[in-house]
Image: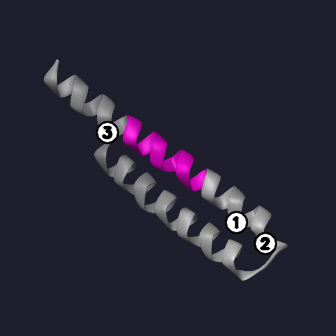
Amino acid sequence: MTVLAAFLLVIGTILILMGAMLMLVGTVLIVLGALLIIIGIALVAVAAFLLIRRALRREG
């Protein structure tokens, strides 16, 4: 579970950075960049959810 969360964090961060680069490059790529940023944020959110759930289960 932790490996999956770490993998999702890395992939999400890479997608966010790629989306930001695309948005800097040109006008047509702004939509694609925004899409990559949204997907990246979603992956990071899922990873955070998995880590928080695991931490709460360990305490309880």
**Mark 3: few, some, or many residues within 10 Å (few <14, many ≥20)?**
some
Q: Residue furthest bottom?
A: 25
Q: Quadrant of the C terminus?
A: top left
Secondary structure of residue under mark 3: helix
Q: Residue at x 31, y 39 (%)?
A: 51
Where's residue 4, x and y in %? 38, 48
Pointer 2 local density, CA inside 10 Å: few below 14, some 14–19, many at least 20? some
Decide: is 59 above or below 9. above
For the point 61% across and 70% down, the residue is 20
Instruction: Please tell me whether residue 42 belongs to the stretch shown in magenta.
Output: yes
13 relative position to 24: left or right: left
First in residue order: circle 3 vs circle 1: 1
Instruction: Give the alpha-carbon distance from disc 2 to disc 1, as whole Å.
Output: 6 Å
Q: Amino acid at mark 2?
A: Leu
Q: Which residues fall within the magenta stretch? A: 39-49
Q: Is residue 14 above or below residue 40?
A: below
The picture places residue 16, in percent across and down from the top left corner, at: 55, 63
Question: Of marks 3 and 2, which one's residue comes earlier in the chain?
Answer: 2
Residues at marks 2 and 1 touching, judged by CB atoms closer than 8 Å: yes
| Mark 3 and mark 1 residues within 8 Å of each other at the beta carbon | no
Give the residue at mark 3: 51
Residue type for callout 3: Leu
| Mark 3–mark 2 distance (CA, rounded to whole Å) | 33 Å
Q: Which residue is mark 2?
A: 29
Q: Is residue 2 magenta?
A: no
Image position of 28 (left or right of 15): right
- Classify mark 2: helix, strand or loop: helix
Type of amino acid under label 1: Gly
Q: Nearer the viewer, mark 3 or mark 2?
A: 2
Front disc: 3 or 1: 1
* The residue positioned farthest toward the top in the image shown: 60
Residue under pointer 1: 33
